[in-house]
Image: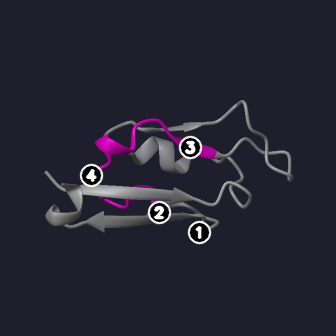
């Protein structure tokens, strides 16, 4: 199975949760313990190991705060 790495710019995230609704592995959530300087609870990742690198989250982000990298099989090891 493919692997990925999600990077979220939490300072730019407005907590819209669009990314959460489209994640097939349900690894994204709103981090209610860390508010950014704009007063929003940003999205965060629970278990990066479960990321399949589909980039659905990045495509749905209206503020372009999410970057997804697909990892090669050699990098996974």
In the displayed structure, would residue 64 be above or below residue 17? below
Do the CB atoms of the residues marked 2 and 1 lie less than 8 Å apart? yes
Mark 3 and mark 1: Cα distance apart in space: 14 Å
Q: Image point 74% across, 38% down: which residue?
A: 34
Q: Give how far across and how far down residue 64 sits, in percent.
A: 59, 69
Q: Image point 68% across, 55% down: which residue?
A: 13
Q: Which residues are magenta?
A: 43-58
Asked whether the viewer can see residue 24, the reply is no
Q: Can you identify the residue that label 4 sits on?
A: 52
Q: Can you identify the residue that label 2 sits on?
A: 58
Q: Secondary structure at mark 3?
A: strand
Which of discs 3 and 2 lies nearer the camera? The answer is: 3
- Name the mark on residue 64: 1
Q: Secondary structure at mark 2?
A: helix
Q: Give how far across and how far down residue 10 sits, in percent.
A: 67, 54
Q: Give how far across and how far down residue 48 sits, in percent.
A: 38, 44
Name the N-terminal-most of marks 4 and 3: 3
Which of discs 3 and 1 lies nearer the camera? The answer is: 3
Q: Can you identify the residue that label 3 sits on?
A: 44
Q: Give how far across and how far down residue 8 sits, in percent.
A: 57, 57
In the displayed structure, would residue 56 be above or below residue 26? below
Task: Classify residue 50 as left or right of residue 48.
Answer: left
Q: Nearer the viewer, residue 23 or 33?
A: 33
In the displayed structure, would residue 19 be above or below residue 30? below
């Amino acid at each position: 199975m493919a692997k990925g790495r999600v990077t979220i710019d939490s300072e730019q995230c407005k907590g819209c949760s669009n990314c959460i609704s489209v994640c097939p592995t349900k690894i994204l959530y709103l981090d209610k313990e860390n508010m950014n300087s704009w007063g929003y609870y940003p999205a965060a990742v629970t278990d990066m190991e479960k990321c399949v690198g589909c980039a659905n989250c990045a495509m749905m982000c209206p503020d372009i705060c999410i970057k997804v990298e697909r990892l090669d099989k050699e990098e996974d090891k």
